[in-house]
Amino acid sequence: MNPSANPDMVGWIKINDTVINYPVMQTKKIPDYYLNHDFYKNESEYGCPYVQANCDVDAPSDNVIIYAHHMNDGSMFAGLENYRSKDYWSSHKTISFDTLNKKANYDILAVFAVPVDESNKNTFKFYEFVNAYDSEHYSSFISKCKALSFYETGVSAKQGDKLLTLATCEYTNNNGRLVVVAKRTTR
């Protein structure tokens, strides 16, 4: 797929040896547009992976957050469910996210599931962390991710490191999200 076919395309996400190999879209004026539209802007229950509207893929933000559906046929981000297993993670540790201007790999540092509950001040609102206010804000986010993680990955991050967060629905929590947080490495 060519970005000239759709100017909303901001990159490509891929995890080797999985079905996750998709264009990534972003629309700032209609943030969730690609929740139910495909690459060609046709209505689709599958949607297309998309970047949260307040993230900047070019600068980039401290954390770029990408959402996609957890489809019953195993497509889109359904495969992230496999990351509940440390054995699976051990053979799929790296995510590739190439923007239109830069190629980058990311090493997974945490995998966790959380409910999304706007009314509960104790819920971990991972989607609110886009840019750190200071080093304490950054390290607090990383610490919370690591504390919630299903297992230890041995990967951590400090302010200045760029993060990629993938999120999809999960069904062990009411309105739950399965979240994979990774740190950019050089490529």
Image (cartoon, rainbow, N blue to C red):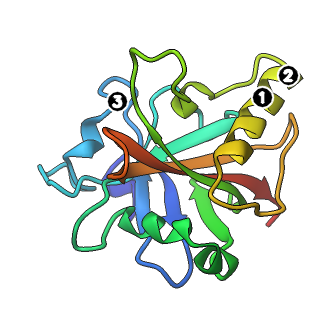
Locate residue 32, reporting x and y percent: 30, 34
Considering the image in quadrants, where does the N terminus appear? Answer: bottom left
SS type, badge 2: helix
Locate residue 110, reporting x and y percent: 67, 54
The reply to whether residue 8 is in sight is no
Q: Could you tell me how far apart the alpha carbons at marks 3 and 2 are, in whole angstroms?
A: 29 Å
Q: Which of 186 and 81 is in front in this view?
A: 81
- Residue annotated with mark 2: 136
Drawn side of residue 16 relative to residue 20, left or right: right
Drawn side of residue 73 relative to residue 185, left or right: left
- For residue 140, the mark is 1
Q: Which amino acid does label 1 sit on?
A: Ser
Quarter of the figure with residue 150: bottom right
Q: In the figure, 1 relative to 137: above or below? A: below
Considering the image in quadrants, where does the C terminus appear? Answer: bottom right
- For residue 31, the mark is 3
Locate residue 42, reporting x and y percent: 13, 52
Q: Residue furthest left?
A: 43
What's the residue at 75%, 43% (across, down)?
162
> Can you tell which of label 1 and label 3 is closer to the viewer?
1
Local packing at callout 3 (Cα closer than 10 Å; few below 14, some 14-19, many 20+) is some
Tell me whether the residue at label 2 lies in contact with that at label 1, contact meaning CB atoms closer than 8 angstroms.
yes
Q: Could you tell me how far apart the alpha carbons at marks 1 and 3 are, in whole angstroms?
A: 27 Å
